[in-house]
Image (tube, rainbow, N blue to C red):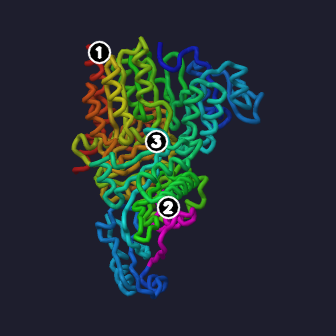
């Protein structure tokens, strides 16, 4: 789960990480009301769940209140990578002497939380990671001990020279780790962490993601969920026990199992087609799931044909077939469908499917080829 | 021979009284797996399918000499179940449960290392040595005894490939579904080493996915240490960057872990990568000169 920058800043503040003042506004009127009359340098920032908003024009400076209102007017409603900006953060801008990067992630390779830091912070951090990876300091954290003070100090020493700043930075790192663990985060970044001309260390921008599997024990975090339209669709699918991700192609796929679903998409691409989605109906054979899955698939107007690929292990093919028959009874559609059933009770399943008159094939390759052909009709 | 499990494996089931636990216990038992006990706190003394139920893993291990455990408990308790098995001295722990929080898996990792416990999963279908022992939720009828090892991060895709192998006359020594979560137990390398040392395994199939660098590490290991032929498949070649594809934990981030890089790494190690799963049996036969 993702949260917005302003929410990450609120969490930082709660854990004692210094952040400049700011207000969140959903409309120009709100900016007029919430922002103080004082003329000072402010930054108006679009709050969206995608990167690259600065380059898209979603971050603007303002020297006066009226200018802040003007900039908010420009940013609110703006489209950034397909997402409409619905809120802006109007924050005090600070003078920056130097920018740093610090971040925590769940590192699958070391099987631990890894702390990363760099003296080259800012928007180009991914470029730094690619071009000069040696400029990114990495430290693996022992889950039993947590981030120890000396470790935080060791990192801070590589970023700062002044003892007071080293102490400030080390404290921020320890607090960030505490926040990370207590909220079951999967990514926590301060980018940039800045040094101001008056020698304060501050978090200017923050990004936090959370482990969906741990949300059951993170009531406060779930309450922060502000999903955009695309995410909303995926969340609704999840609630029904389906994993759905919309893509740009025109061949809808419904598959059981994430790996097989990915392989199915690959196969469609391999034979010259373009998958419309990733859709994993999971390990159960509940017919309702198939109905829900078909509804989601056919709700995408780009879909010109549907490929259903089921390998029955625990999911029995006859159950899937019954689900399909039920689903197709409910949903009247002209979109052509091809079905491939194999594995547990495939014979019984194929027998049931026959009554729908839909084309049934034996292998994945055949199914992909057929789905592509059907999409062209 | 085989790896990890065989006809002498003594298995206990953690969460044996739950719906999934009970269902798959009967399936595993029917296959011939030697299930010596089950765990369900507070239900010690009862029986499930004629199998004695214990309150703790420790009690079960003491009473039965169990050396393997399979976990079906709900996700919030799975991390603790792994720890309980590890501290009780169980050598092999297989966690079927999906949606286990990543922090819980990170916490158990150093404990497993300290206690010398081998973990498969979480979020995995389990493993099987055909005709000897099945642990987990794999559909038994598609497997056949033979000389091919198989390691996979996926579930149903594994069944798909195994079915193709079996239908083309290629049986298996042991097939292991290691699970697709971001942080999990044994990885490709650990298992490749076991297959290399198993006299009955003649070739290995590796089914990878986008995300992480387990495949790249495997490729390096194969190049340096393996004498047996390996054939690979990578799922997710068409996935857009930055998207998590279901519970597979398949995330591509900032250039590392892409399908193209994995294919390149495997090819550099002399490992052919199948364009689609149906090519795998022929690639194996070619490597074995069949």
Q: Identify residue for label 1.
A: B288
Q: Residues within 10 Å of mark 3 (few under 14, many from 20)?
A: many
Looking at the rendering, the stretch of residues picked out in magenta corresponds to A1-26
- In front: mark 3 or mark 2? 2
- In front: mark 3 or mark 1? 3
Q: Residue at x 53, y 48 (%)?
A: A150
Q: Secondary structure at mark 2?
A: helix
Q: Residue at x 38, y 53 (%)?
A: A118
Q: Please, which chain is the residue tagged with disc 3 on?
A: B
Query: A311 or A159, which lies in front?
Result: A159
Figure check: B73 above or below A184: above
Q: Please, which chain is the residue tagged with disc 2 on?
A: A
Q: Identify residue for label 2.
A: A164
Q: Secondary structure at mark 3?
A: loop
Residue A74 in sight from this viewpoint: yes
Residue B182, numbered label: 3
Q: Residue at x 26, y 34 (%)?
A: B264
Real-space Cα separation, disc 2 to disc 1, in angstroms:
66 Å
């Amino acid at each position: 789960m993702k949260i917005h920058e302003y929410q990450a800043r609120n969490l930082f503040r709660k854990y004692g990480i210094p952040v400049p003042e700011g207000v969140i506004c959903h409309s120009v009127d709100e900016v007029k009301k919430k922002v103080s009359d004082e003329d000072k340098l402010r930054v108006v920032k679009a709050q969206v769940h995608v990167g690259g908003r600065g380059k898209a024009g979603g971050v603007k400076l303002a020297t006066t209140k009226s200018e802040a209102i003007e900039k908010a007017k420009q940013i609110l409603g703006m489209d950034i990578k397909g997402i409409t900006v619905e809120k802006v953060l109007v924050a005090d801008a600070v003078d920056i002497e130097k920018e740093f990067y610090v971040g925590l992630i769940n590192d699958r390779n070391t099987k631990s939380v890894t702390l990363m830091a760099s003296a080259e912070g800012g928007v180009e951090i991914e470029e730094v990671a690619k071009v000069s990876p040696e400029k990114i300091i990495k430290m693996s954290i022992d889950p039993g001990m947590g981030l120890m003070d000396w470790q935080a100090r060791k990192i801070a020493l590589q970023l700062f020279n002044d003892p007071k700043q080293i102490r400030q930075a080390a404290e921020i790192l320890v607090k960030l780790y505490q926040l990370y663990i207590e909220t079951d985060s999967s990514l926590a970044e301060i980018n940039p962490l800045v040094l101001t001309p008056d020698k304060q260390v501050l978090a200017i921008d923050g990004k936090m993601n959370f482990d969906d599997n741990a949300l059951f024990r993170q009531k406060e975090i779930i309450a922060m969920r502000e999903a955009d339209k695309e995410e909303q669709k995926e969340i609704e699918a999840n609630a029904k026990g389906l994993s759905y991700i919309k893509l740009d192609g025109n061949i809808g796929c419904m598959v059981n199992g994430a790996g097989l679903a990915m392989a199915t998409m690959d196969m469609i691409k391999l034979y010259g087609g373009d998958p419309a989605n990733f859709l994993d109906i999971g390990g159960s054979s509940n017919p309702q799931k198939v109905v829900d899955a078909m509804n989601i698939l056919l709700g995408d107007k780009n879909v010109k044909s549907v490929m259903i690929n089921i390998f029955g292990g625990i999911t029995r093919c006859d159950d899937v077939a019954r689900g399909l028959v039920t689903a197709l009874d409910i949903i009247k559609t002209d979109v052509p469908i091809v079905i491939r059933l194999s594995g547990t009770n495939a014979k019984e399943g194929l027998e049931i499917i026959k009554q729908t008159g839909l084309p049934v094939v034996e292998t994945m390759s055949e199914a992909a080829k057929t789905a592509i052909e059907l999409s062209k009709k | 021979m085989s790896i990890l499990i065989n006809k002498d494996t003594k298995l206990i089931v953690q969460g044996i009284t739950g719906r999934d636990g009970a269902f798959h216990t009967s399936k595993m038992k029917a296959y011939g797996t030697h299930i010596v006990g089950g765990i369900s706190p507070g239900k010690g003394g009862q029986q499930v399918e004629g199998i004695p139920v214990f309150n703790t893993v420790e009690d079960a291990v003491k009473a039965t000499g169990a050396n393997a455990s399979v976990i079906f408990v709900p996700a919030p308790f799975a991390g603790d179940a792994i720890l309980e098995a590890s501290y009780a001295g169980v050598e092999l722990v297989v966690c079927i449960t999906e949606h286990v929080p990543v922090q819980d898996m990170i916490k158990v990792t150093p404990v497993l290392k300290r206690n010398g416990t081998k973990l498969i999963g979480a979020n995995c279908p389990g493993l099987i040595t055909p005709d000897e022992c099945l642990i987990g939720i794999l559909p038994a009828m598609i497997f056949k005894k033979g000389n091919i090892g198989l390691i996979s991060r996926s579930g149903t895709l594994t069944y798909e490939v195994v079915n193709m192998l079996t239908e083309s006359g290629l049986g298996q020594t042991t097939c292991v579904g290691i699970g697709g979560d971001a942080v999990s137990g044994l990885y490709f390398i650990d298992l490749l080493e076991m297959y290399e040392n198993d006299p009955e395994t003649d070739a290995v199939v590796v089914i990878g996915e986008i995300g992480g660098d387990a495949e790249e590490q495997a490729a390096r290991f194969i190049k340096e240490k393996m004498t047996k032929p390996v054939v690979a498949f990578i799922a997710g070649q068409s996935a857009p960057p930055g998207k998590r594809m279901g519970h597979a934990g398949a995330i591509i981030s900032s250039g590392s872990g892409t399908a193209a890089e994995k294919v390149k790494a495997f090819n550099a190690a002399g490992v052919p990568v199948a364009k689609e799963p149906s090519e795998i049996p022929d690639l194996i036969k070619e490597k074995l000169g069949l």
